[in-house]
Structures are given as C-alpha cells and as structure tokens.
Image (cartoon, rainbow, N blue to C red):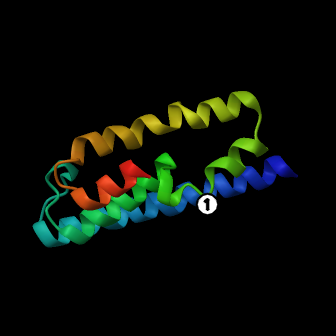
C-alpha cells in the first residue's frame, strides 16, 4: 500500500512538472517564435520553467513529494530517483540558467 501511494505521488508530481515545462516552452514559442529552450526570453516562461525544474529536482520550495516517495519505495528505486532521475532536469537548468530569474534562483539555492 505504501509503495503504491509513493508511485502515484511520484507519477503525479512528475506529470504536473512535465506539463508546466511543456506549457512554458509553448508560451516561449508563442512569444518569441522559436522553440529553442536555451534562448528563452519571456519572463513568465522562464519562471514557469524554473518552477517545473524545481519540482522535478525536488529542490527546497517544492520538495513536498520527495521524502514520502523515498520512504515508500525500495532502496534501489530510491537511489534511482535520487540520482539518475535528476540528470535531465539539472542539464536543462544548466543550459537555461542565463535566462532564468536570478532572484528566484538565489532563493532556491539558499533554501
């Protein structure tokens, strides 16, 4: 029962974060006419992208799901979620960090 709850919570959180990331890319494409995420200039799209990446990574303001998912899974699954599942969001964060809001990024870093 606990593993099923953890799986559902992980799936829903990651699905919402993916939807927000897709929406931010769409908003950026509508505003700028390009789909390149490394050239994001719309401030709302950048903020939404940062929110989505923060959810996917499990960083401080939006980390509500991470402890409960880790407790409800096996050790190997928890290790996979804690390591391999963070590579893509961190890569996107590294690629787009010049265009993301610096004050919000600093707040996330301090937390």
Residue at (51%, 63%) from the top-left corner? 16
Q: How would you rate the neighbour count of disc 1 (Cα within 10 Å): few for under 14, some for 14-19, many for 20 or more?
A: few
As rendered, which of 26 and 102 lies closer to the eye? 102
Q: Position of residue 23 (x, y in %)?
A: 35, 67
Q: How many marks?
A: 1
Callout 1: SS: helix
Q: Nearer the viewer, residue 101 or 3?
A: 101
Query: Along the horizontal axis of the image, is 85 left or right of 38?
Result: right
22 to 53, vertically: above or below:
below
The image shows residue 108 at horizontal and vertical percentages of: 38, 54
Which residue sits at x=76%, y=40%? Answer: 73
Q: Residue 68 at what x, y percent from top left?
A: 71, 51
Vertical comparison of 23 with 82: above or below: below
Q: Is residue 62 left or right of residue 21?
A: right
- 68 vs 35, nearest the viewer: 68
Q: Nearer the viewer, residue 98 or 9?
A: 98
Q: Residue at x 61, y 58 (%)?
A: 64
Q: Is residue 49 above or below residue 7?
A: below
* Residue sticking out furthest to the front: 110
Q: Residue at x 39, y 61 (%)?
A: 51
**x then y, percent, for residue 5:** 78, 55
Q: Is residue 84 left or right of residue 9?
A: left
Q: Which residue is mark 1?
A: 12
């Amino acid at each position: 029962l606990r593993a099923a709850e953890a799986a559902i919570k992980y799936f829903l959180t990651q699905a919402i974060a993916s939807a927000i990331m897709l929406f931010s890319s769409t908003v950026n494409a509508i505003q700028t006419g390009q789909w390149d995420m490394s050239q994001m200039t719309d401030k709302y799209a950048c903020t939404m992208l940062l929110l989505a990446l923060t959810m996917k990574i499990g960083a401080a303001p939006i980390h509500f799901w991470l402890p409960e998912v880790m407790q409800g899974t096996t050790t190997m699954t928890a290790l996979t979620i804690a390591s391999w599942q963070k590579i893509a969001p961190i890569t996107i964060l590294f690629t787009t960090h010049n265009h993301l809001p610096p004050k919000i990024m600093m707040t996330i870093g301090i937390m």
